[in-house]
Amino acid sequence: MGAVVPDQPGEGTHGTDESRKTVLSTTSEGKTPPELPVPARSDEDDGALVARAREGDADAWAAIVDRHLPMVNAIASSYRLGSPDREDAVQTVWLTLNQHLPRLHSPHHLRHWLRRVTRSTCARQRRNGLDLHPVDPHALAARHPDGGSEDLDPEALYLRKEVHEALHRALGTLTDPADRRAALYYLGQAQPGETTPVERRRLKRRLHRILREDR
Amino acid sequence: MNHRSAHTGDLRGRAAALAAFDRSDDLRGHAPVAAEHRPAPEPLRSGGPELLTHLRFDHDAFTLDVWVRAEGGMRSLSGLVAEEDPDSPRARVHVRRPDRTLGRRVALDGSFGVAGLAPGPVSLVVEHRRDGAVATDWFTV
């Protein structure tokens, strides 16, 4: 924007390669670009700098940036965003300040305004990041096609319920209570009093007898 | 508060911050974010783009709804301009990035779309032949 980036609604950029990373946010992690001059100190207060920047004074804007950028970076770093996300958030803060500059109610409270905007921008950026999880492709290949475990598949749950109901209908047709207890034991649904070793052996014998008779 | 200390802090992103200075927005109207809705993630039913967020921007003359979707590493925007006066529809939307601007024609039903955007800051400028341009807040996609 400004002198560096064409931001006017000129249509000459249509069809450009959008996959290229945002040019202005590609500064190396932890390094100040070597071509940048050492920021100059300014003794003016924020109100005066904002007033000058509103008139189009780029030096005043640079003084605002140099004064508050460390604070904005510190807040953004505290959100533990990835490097590109943090750069995007910080860049969005300055673009927002540029846009809101004529409408700032209390320019002398610029630091507080920037702190609030940085926090909300970083929080939004972090929420964006939470929606997108990098996944190991091998884990995806081994995953159930429906995206969840088989136990949670609604169709599997429904079929399991149908089988359960059909078995219990069949158990209801058994007239001998001993046969019914043996069948319940076979299904793993024995009563607590029927799980002693002696009772289990008795139920197993009963089961074998039922199976032999059915053959 | 004393701001007159030496600049010894973290100045990463200084070039981008300096480049953000542009007074052309001062002549435009402003459409702030009025609402933001983030749908709960749902199981993917197809390989289509995943809806990340829905933003609504309000202005006196129109309401702008924007849906941001993710597909692979890229983002797409689809929008709908709802006019207060349906007889004077908006003509164009400019999708502003920090380093470029993409123009899109608004369809007669008020819809528009942009695909293949790299993640980063975005602002929209809704243009009208008669009323001039209105810029939305900057937001990240």
Image: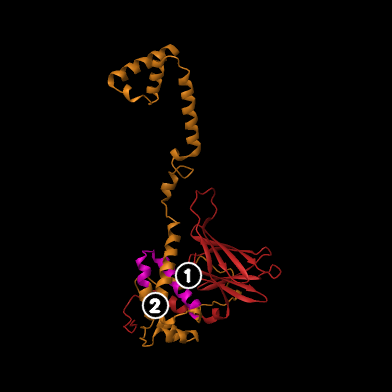
Chain colours: A orange, B red
In the figure, residue B102 lies in which quadrant?
A: bottom right
Q: Are marks 1 and 2 in contact (CB under 8 Å)?
A: no
Q: Which mark is residue A111?
A: 2
- At label 2, counting other C-alpha atoms closer than 10 Å, the crowd grade (few under 14, some 14-19, many 20 or more) is some
Is residue B46 a member of the stretch shown in magenta?
no
Side of A76 relative to B95 (left or right):
left
Query: Residues in magenta?
Result: A73-101
* Residue A35 appears in view: no
Which amino acid type is marked by label 2? Arg
Q: Determine the chain carrying the residue at label 1.
A: A
The CA distance from mark 1 to mark 2 is 27 Å
Residue B103, compared with residue A53, is above or below; it is above
The secondary structure that dominates the magenta segment is helix
**Disc 2: host chain:** A
- On the picture, is B130 further left or further right than A32? right
Q: Is residue A79 above or below residue A67?
A: above
- Which residue is depicted at the point 43% across and 50% down? A137
Q: Residue type at mark 1: give it.
A: Thr
The question of residue A100 being in magenta is answered with yes
For label 2, the SS is helix
Q: Which residue is mark 1?
A: A22
- Residue placed furthest toward the right: B87
Regarding residue A78, the answer to whether it shows in the image is yes
